[in-house]
Image (cartoon, rainbow, N blue to C red):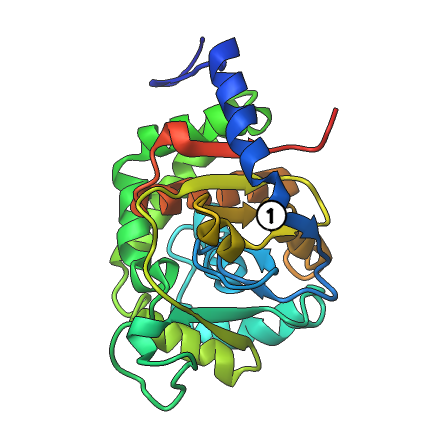
Amino acid sequence: MTQHEGFSMAIDSDEQRLGNEAALAEREQFFEAATLAESRVFCGDDRGREHFVHMFGGLLNIVYNHLVMLETIEPESVKESFAQATASMVPVIMTKGGAPKAGVHSDEAAEHGMELRVDVEDGPLGCKYADARAAISSLIATDADKVIGMSSRKRPELFSNPEDVAFAKRLAEAHGRLAEREGFITTGREVALSAVKAGAESSVVPGSHSTDSIGIINLVAGTAPDTGAGMDAGLPFYDEDSWATKQINENLSDLYPFDSRQQEIAETIDTIGTMIALGVDEKDIYVRRPAA
């Protein structure tokens, strides 16, 4: 194994690789062709009931990781709230970002039905990425070595030198500052409603999360799953279509000129932190890669 400043970047054994291939093969049936231009974009929730591009939090994923990048590069630079940043960035993500059908979601329990109650401003949202945003960022900051270690083992190509690890640690510190910044994170519902009021789409998923759900990081561009079909088949899974976040960030690169590799590191760390918060064990997180 390789040692990187306090954590190990282990190479998967043949047995682990075979296990990964089996778990992914079982769920391959649920992946179909998808494009940002034509597909809807919602959360990586395991309960989604249709075929769409998955990013934890939906378009909130792009907004939050944008703010984390700003805070990492220049500490204390983020002055507006998550909700305010969401309202201003939604039109940019949907137009210039190339994701015209991007949105946010809630669940049936929070909405007492299958439509987002846009007139209800208080209470839970039903999307853990939004509802538990401060807790997820606090977890990333507090357990930085664990989160970075897991990220490096799942995406070793992003952590090939000490500079990558040093940047990841600064990212974790930025998550911690944002989690504690007064007025920055209000409620998940406020953030989601600010997105909808700015033009984002909305959806509501039924039921509860499965305790058996695995996590998939999908790097195969132009594909996305129907996680609801996986749930129905007894093969539940969360999914992060990382190719899609990368594509949106590339589309926005002239407006937000971040280093693309560093953005991938940021998205990976946020994804791993979210999966940990959802109760997914490291051994149950898999990376779906393009065929060699």
Q: Where is residue 218 in the image (x, y as percent from the top left)?
A: 59, 41
Q: How many labels does the image show?
A: 1
Quadrant showing the C terminus: top right
Label 1 environment density (alpha carbons within 10 Å; few <14, some 14–19, many ≥20): some
Considering only vertical position in the picture, is 201 above or below 131? below
Q: Position of residue 228 (x, y in %)?
A: 49, 57
Q: Position of residue 78 (x, y in %)?
A: 42, 61
**76 sits left or right of 226 in the view:** left
Question: Which residue shows up at 40% across the image and 68% down it?
Answer: 82
Mark 1: amino acid: Phe
Quadrant showing the N terminus: top left
Considering only vertical position in the picture, is 61 above or below 10? below
Q: Nearer the viewer, residue 87 or 197?
A: 197
Q: Nearer the viewer, residue 204 or 248?
A: 204
Camera sees residue 237:
yes
The residue lying furthest to the bottom in this view is: 119
Considering only vertical position in the picture, is 122 above or below 90? below
**18 sits left or right of 246 in the view:** left
Q: What element carries label 1?
A: helix
Question: Which residue shows up at 67% across the image and 62% down it?
Answer: 255
Q: Which of 41 and 97 is in front in this view?
A: 41
Residue at image mark 1: 30
Camera sees residue 258:
no
Question: Which residue shows up at 56% across the image and 77% down it?
Answer: 200
**179 sits left or right of 288 in the view:** left
